[in-house]
Amino acid sequence: MQLNLFSVPVFIGNINSKKLKFTNQKTQSSFASDIKTSIETGEKNLKEESAQYLVDSIVKLLEEKFKSPFKITLTSIWQNIYKKNDFQEKHIHIGSHFSFIIYDKIDTPKTLFFNPAYYLIESFYKESDGFKQGDICDTNFMPPCREGQIIVFPSFLEHMVRKTSNAVTISGNINFKFI
């Protein structure tokens, strides 16, 4: 018998990013990779009806996993604009329970998620010992998302964006509370 221990839930669904109307469209270079982004804190960067649409969409996805009543709060949201060969380094989202990425304009998503035990796995099981990724457990995952989809994931999940061009994503953070 095989059991998969310590799985990390990730939720993928459809979303109409055209319904998300931002109050601030200004971007500036940010992060170590210098991509253009519009980081703003809180729901104030989205019009009220847009924020409600986003929250309702995320709640619908999370209801697959959490059956008890809960409430989510949008704590931050921003747009990332990727020009030619832009990328984003490995990172997590501190101070929130879940994070999300909306693929507004993409050809192929380049988001790569890493197993929380990535460094431990890599240090013990090397290909030179005959192990291949997936023999013990996968060390990374590239979601099969497409334009017009959202992925919601625990904020502790380390991820990055490989080099990409002419893409726009909308990212943000939420907090979660059972009621």
Image (cartoon, rainbow, N blue to C red):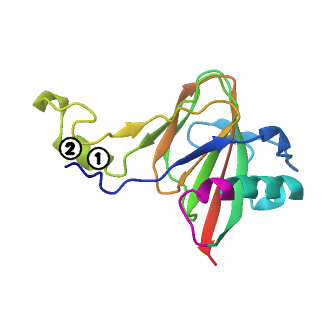
Residue holding disc 2: 123
Distance between mark 2 and mark 1 Cα atoms = 6 Å
Above or below, comparing residue 160 to residue 172 in the picture: above
Residue occupying the point 68% across, 25% down: 83
* Label 1 environment density (alpha carbons within 10 Å; few <14, some 14–19, many ≥20): few
Say which amino acid is labelled 1. Answer: Tyr
Task: Specify the segment rendered in magenta.
Answer: 59-68
Which one is in front, 31 or 48? 48
* Residue 75 picture location, percent across and down: 69, 63
* Residue 122 picture location, percent across and down: 24, 41
Q: Is residue 122 visible?
A: yes
Residue 64 part of the magenta-drawn span: yes
* Residue 14 picture location, percent across and down: 68, 40
* Residues tagged 2 and 1 counted as in contact (Cβ below 8 A): yes
Residue occupying the point 45% across, 41% down: 113
Residue 131 part of the magenta-drawn span: no
In this view, which residue lies farthest toward the front? 1
Local secondary structure at mark 1:
helix
The reply, left or right, for residue 121 in relation to residue 63 is left
Q: How many marks?
A: 2
* Quadrant for the C terminus in the image: bottom right
Above or below, comparing residue 3 to residue 82 in the picture: below
Residue occupying the point 67% across, 59% down: 59
Residue holding disc 1: 119
